[in-house]
Image: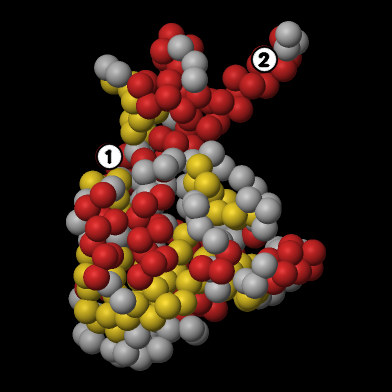
């Protein structure tokens, strides 16, 4: 029998995971939560009530949605924009691996969006993406051809998802894929707080000759709820920032993944 403090810790951890799921998909149903956690609807409704009380979500009959979704969608803002300096550095380094005439797949997310901020040197490019914000950002650039997948719209990541998005990649052949992830671990691979994008990410990987995972160092050696069933032989590069340790670099490179480290800009003395 767990102690009261252990039960409270489990409850807090579960609520954090529920919030991660909602931040990933924008919404969640009580039914989906019962299937994921194996707990009663009453328990999970209580969790959602607490998250609403804390100002994170808005409950509706049968589930909950992200509180800031409407505002952020209207302003084309992505959720959880943290570690921006690291992501900008990763974006600059990743952009150096894009060449004129490439066909590139961009996953959705803040790090992949940072790459598109650094490709002003490119004059000819074909882009396939699930990210609505990236399509809008690059769509007006001369010489850049955009293919935006169909599917279900996810407002936290401003992206399309689901079976239709995955099937779009069946006949796509791209030189390079820049793939985002929630967590990455040498032992447990890539993982995500929600399983809705797993098929899409696998379809992207199967469509690309070279796969670059772009992830800031805060995501390394972390694990989320749903693993991407992908062999390390399908991942060619990890582009991250200088917060990665030498031991972590060695662990990835032992798996055959080349680690590229983006230097952070020097801080100016005050």
Q: Nearer the viewer, residue 51 or 131?
A: 131
Quarter holding the N terminus is top right
Compared across the picture, whether 270 is left or right of 230 comes to: right
Residue that mark 1 sits on:
70
Q: Position of residue 97 (x, y in %)?
A: 48, 83
Q: Nearer the viewer, residue 38 or 153?
A: 38
Compared across the picture, whether 25 is left or right of 179 comes to: left
Q: Residue at x 48, y 32 (%)?
A: 19
Residue 209 seen in the figure: yes
Residue that mark 2 sits on:
7
Task: Look at the picture and state if 34 lies above or below 3.
Answer: below
Between tags 2 and 1, which lies in front? 2
Task: Look at the picture and state if 246 lies above or below 141.
Answer: above
Along the polypeptide, which appears first: circle 2 or circle 1? 2
Q: Is the residue marked by circle 1 packed among few (<14), some (14-19), or many (20+) residues within 10 Å?
A: few
Q: Position of residue 128 (x, y in %)?
A: 28, 70
Compared across the picture, whether 179 is left or right of 61 comes to: right
CA gap, disc 2 and disc 1: 34 Å
Query: Tag 2, which secondary structure?
Result: helix
Q: Residue at x 36, y 44 (%)?
A: 196
Q: Quadrant of residue 7?
A: top right
Q: Is the residue marked by circle 2 packed among few (<14), some (14-19), or many (20+) residues within 10 Å?
A: few
Residue 219 seen in the figure: no
Quarter holding the C terminus is bottom right
Q: Position of residue 269 (x, y in %)?
A: 73, 71
Q: Position of residue 184 (x, y in %)?
A: 60, 55
The extreme right residue here reads: 247
Q: Residue at x 28, y 65 (%)?
A: 169
Q: Residue at x 43, y 84 (%)?
A: 98
């Amino acid at each position: 029998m767990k102690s009261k403090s252990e039960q409270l810790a489990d409850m807090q951890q579960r609520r954090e995971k529920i919030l991660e799921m909602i931040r990933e998909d924008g919404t969640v149903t009580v039914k989906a939560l019962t299937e994921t956690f194996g707990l009663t609807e009453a328990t999970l409704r209580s969790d959602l009530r607490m998250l609403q009380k804390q100002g994170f979500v808005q409950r509706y009959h049968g589930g909950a949605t992200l509180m800031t979704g409407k505002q952020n969608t209207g302003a084309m803002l992505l959720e959880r924009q943290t570690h921006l300096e690291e992501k900008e550095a990763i974006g600059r380094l990743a952009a150096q691996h894009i060449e004129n005439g490439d066909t590139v797949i961009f996953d959705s997310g803040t790090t992949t969006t940072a790459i598109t901020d650094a490709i002003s040197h490119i004059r000819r490019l074909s882009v396939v993406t699930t990210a609505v914000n990236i399509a809008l950002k690059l769509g007006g650039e001369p010489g850049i051809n955009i293919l935006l997948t169909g599917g279900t719209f996810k407002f936290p990541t401003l992206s399309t998802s689901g079976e239709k998005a995955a099937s779009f990649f069946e006949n796509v052949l791209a030189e390079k894929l820049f793939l985002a992830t929630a967590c990455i671990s040498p032992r447990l691979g890539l993982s995500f707080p929600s399983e809705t994008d797993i098929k899409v990410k696998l379809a992207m990987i199967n469509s690309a000759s070279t796969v670059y995972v772009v992830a800031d160092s805060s995501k390394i050696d972390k694990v989320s709820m749903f693993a991407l069933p992908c062999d390390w032989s399908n991942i060619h590069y990890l582009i991250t920032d200088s917060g990665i340790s030498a031991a972590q670099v060695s662990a990835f490179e032992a798996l055959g993944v080349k680690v590229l480290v983006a230097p952070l800009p020097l801080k100016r003395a005050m």
